[in-house]
Each structure stands twice: as C-alpha cells, then as structure tokens.
Image (cartoon, rainbow, N blue to C red):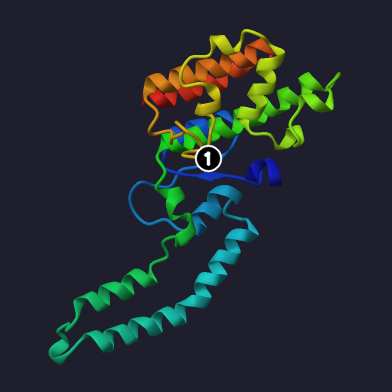
Amino acid sequence: HFQRRFGAGHTFLCSADNNLGIIANAQGLPIITPPRRGRWTSRDIAKSAYGMESPVVAVFSSSNLAQQPAQQQRRQDAKSNSTGVAGVAENPAAVKAVQVEETDSMLIDDEDADALEETPLNVLHDDVREFFTRLLVDLAGRVGASGIRPEDVSVHAPATWSAAEALDYLYDHCKGIKKEMRSPAPEVFLSKRYSARGARTGQEWSPADWRVGLENLNIVGAAFGVKDLQAYLAVALQTIRR
C-alpha cells in the first residue's frame, strides 16, 4: 500500500521475520532486518534506509543531544526518590520503571499492537487476499468492457466489487470454470477473516487448504490469460511449508 502510494525508494519493510522478508523481497520491497539481540532504535533504521551522511540521520543525532539534559534530570529525580538511608533502594521497581522509560527503544502505538501480533501466515493471507481481489476485479472490468449491459452487473461499479462479486461475474463469462474449483472455494478463501461463513485467518487455514486455495486462484488466472502468477504462488507455497 505505502509503496504504491509514495513510490519506490520511499518505502521499506523493517522486520526480523524471514518469511515476511521473502514475500516483501519478491514484490521488490527493500528490507531492513534489525539485530535479534541488543538495542536498536529508529536512528538505526534511518541509517540503514538513507545512509550515515543523510540529513535525516543528523536530525536524529541533534534530537538525542537535545534530550540529554532532561534525561539526566530524570535520573537524578529517580535516584533521590528511590534510595533511602545509606543508599539502599526502598523501591527497586521504581528505578527499573524509570530505566525502561529512558531507553531509546522504539515505542509502539496501541493501535499497532494487533498488527505486531500477527503470524507470518496471517500476514501472507492478507497479502494474497488483497493481491487477488485487485486482480479479479481488474479481470472482471476487462472482460466486461467490450459489451457490458447495465442489467448484467451489480449496482456498484466494478472497482468497488469484492472478490466474491468479481468471481461470480467471471464464472458467468467462463462456463465450467466454477466446477473446477475445490473446497475452500476462492470466494471463501479470499474473504476477509470472519467476514463471511467459513472465512478465517491465514493461520487457521490448514496447509492443504492453502494449497487448494492457491491452486484454485491459479486456475482462474490461467482461464483468463493471466501470466506470471507462478513466481508469486511459489513464494506463498514456500512460506506455507515453513
């Protein structure tokens, strides 16, 4: 989404998830992998993305210097509030809490917490769902562009269709293809989690369901002359096997 919105060179994926990295790399998205141990900060991300000499990195450095007096004052306040006679800590938890507050580790908004808890399969399923929904809607628009009649389509414009609506339209224009679909049907497999009967998260689909779901999508794409799906599907299958 952000790469399409801001263009190549302005969007990076920062993740220690190797499976997610494979998917991103296959789509041409640059990857930044943080160290698995030790501290890392937003400044480290800026250095990896823009280089050490970038003004962006310099801004981070200036910001850190400006914050040092305030951090030193917090340390002094914490020391005076948490130590008693002979320097013995009366409330060790208080010191620990201040230390956590001072760290330069990345802070996460509450609204992003659910996204960080996503498993690779859930992320992959969202990606597959969005990719093929766009593909199917585009196909429906191209198939009907030459002679579509108003009574043949939904009251909505094709661009606003769901995957299920696009598939219904494509089934009508390629008789017999629906009979080739195995369970889970693509309209179910591509439904947003829990939004329809049988719809679920990527983690909740079994490996066999994943294989059938991807094979169904490949059949639909091939029936309408869509090329170059194999590389995308191969990456998805590789992630599932892991």
Image check: 126 left or right of 221? left
In this picture, residue 218 sits left or right of residue 6: left
Quadrant containing the N terminus in the rendered view: top right
Residue 191 x/y as whole percent? 53, 33
The answer to whether one can see residue 41 in this image is: yes
Q: Name the residue nearer the viewer: 127 or 103.
A: 127
The one of 77 and 62 positioned closer to us in this rendering: 77
| 209 displayed left or right of 83 | right
Question: From what the image shows, is residue 230 above or below residue 127?
Answer: above
Question: Residue 228 lies in what quarter of the image?
Answer: top right
Category of crowding for the residue at label 1, using alpha-carbon neighbours closer than 10 angstroms: few (below 14), some (14–19), many (at least 20)? some
Q: What residue is shown at x 39% (from left), y 19% (from top)?
A: 208
Which residue, as the protein is rendered here, is positioned at the far bottom?
85
* Element carrying mark 1: strand
Q: Quadrant of the C terminus?
A: top left
Point out residue 139 in the picture as x, y percentages from the top left corner. 72, 22
- Residue 129: percent from the left, percent from the top? 55, 32
- Foreground of the two, 73 or 137: 137
- The outermost residue toward the right is 147
Front residue (pair 150, 115): 150
Q: Does residue 217 lie above or below 196 as drawn?
A: above
Residue type, label 1:
Ile
Mark 1 lies on residue: 31
Q: Where is residue 46 shown, x and y percent of the image?
A: 55, 54
